[in-house]
Image: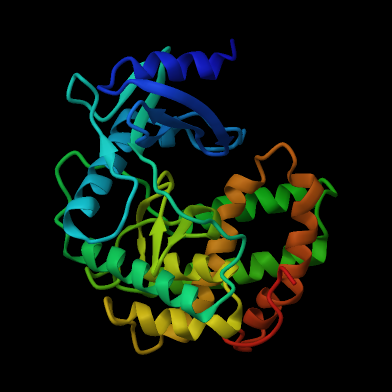
Amino acid sequence: MNENLSIAKEALNNYSITCKSIDFIGQSANTIYKITDLENNSYSLRLHTSKSETLESFWTEQEVIHSEMVWLHSLASDTDLTLPSPFKNTHGEFITNVNNISCTLVKWVEGVQKPFITTLDDAGYVGEMIGKLHRQSSNWKIPNLFERPAFDGSRILQSLEKLKEQSNAGLLNADDTELLQNAGQRVIKMMNSIERTPRNWGMIHADLIPSNLVFHGKEASPIDFGACGFGFYLFDLGWTFSYIHPSFRDQLLTSYSKYHPLPDDYIELLEGFFIAGQLETMNFWLGLPDSQEWLPDHIAKLANREINSYVKNESFLFNGIPYWE
């Protein structure tokens, strides 16, 4: 029997559900199984193991995983969003340990997933959802013993070091990498210059991209909070914009601002956080076994479009050709 499947089955013995089926969904930062019980209720069982060789070890620490569950539990209580709310095991704990692997069980969120946000309506639903998340976060009192990473300039510096190593080894185009380095240093300077307040800094999802969004009716739901941590709220939006066409971004922001305020200079800041999101995520991408097959092309398009505009002080948020086209 597959070792992960064996761990999943043993973990399920610690919950008050009778499993009818268990289906492997995928593995990225975590290994995910969909569980269906005899009453046809569905759950997501996560084994906190990654396929990226460079994913930092703190993501699998007990306190860090427990804190994710605590925030999810609070979000489910404080908002009207449909969320992957967590379940405690029969011992009253959010985490079940099997063979030194931490396992968590959350509600399965039904709906449709889309590769990109392709309509104004969908962009509005996403903006509304993110606004509600940030409103809750800005009003939430962080509990004691709460540990999640911070999305600050230090993580971007790590990415820039890895990019430099890959470039020096001839695996990435030197000119593209130099552009990324210049943009990265500017982004770090920008982030360090912003005073952190409850209105602009708190718990964020940090990975609100289409693979972590589920649509049903007139609602967009966030799933997979595994990357959540402390950060600027605009970081969340900047990363989401990586997957939303420029022509839909204004609609998203209009819906968002009904629930959480945008700063006066939000366009300039969002362009910086768009770059920040791309650079920060390269920490993870560079450790994937297949990254050499697609990452150099991704970086080339990004360098020649959004990052080229950014270093030239040319606005790109609402115009231009996005890097994926």
Specify the quadrant of the image occupied by residue 113: bottom right
* Relative height, residue 82 to residue 266 (above, below): above
Quadrant holding the N terminus? top right
Q: Residue furthest right?
A: 170
- Which image quadrant is residue 296 in? bottom right
* Residue at horizontal 83 percent and vertical 59 percent from the top: 173
Give the x, y percent position of residue 188: 49, 67
Front in this rendered view, residue 66 or 25? 25
- Res 102 visible: yes
Q: Closer to the camera, 322 or 170?
A: 322
Q: Can you say whether 227 is above or below 46 in the image? A: below
Residue 78 x %, y %: 17, 58
What is the x, y in percent for residue 40? 37, 34
Q: Where 119 sits versus 277, above or below?
A: below
Asked if residue 241 lies left or right of residue 161, the reply is left
Q: Is 193 displayed left or right of 75 in the figure?
A: right
| Display coloring | rainbow
Q: Residue furthest front?
A: 39
Residue in view at x 34 percent, y 38 percent: 106
Nearer to me, 241 or 41: 41
Q: Work out whether residue 317 can be spotted.
A: no
Residue displayed at 17% across by 52% down: 77
Q: Residue at x 60, y 33 (%)?
A: 51
Report whether 188 appears left or right of 180: left
How many badges with numbers are in the image?
Answer: 0
Q: Is residue 12 above or below residue 148?
A: above
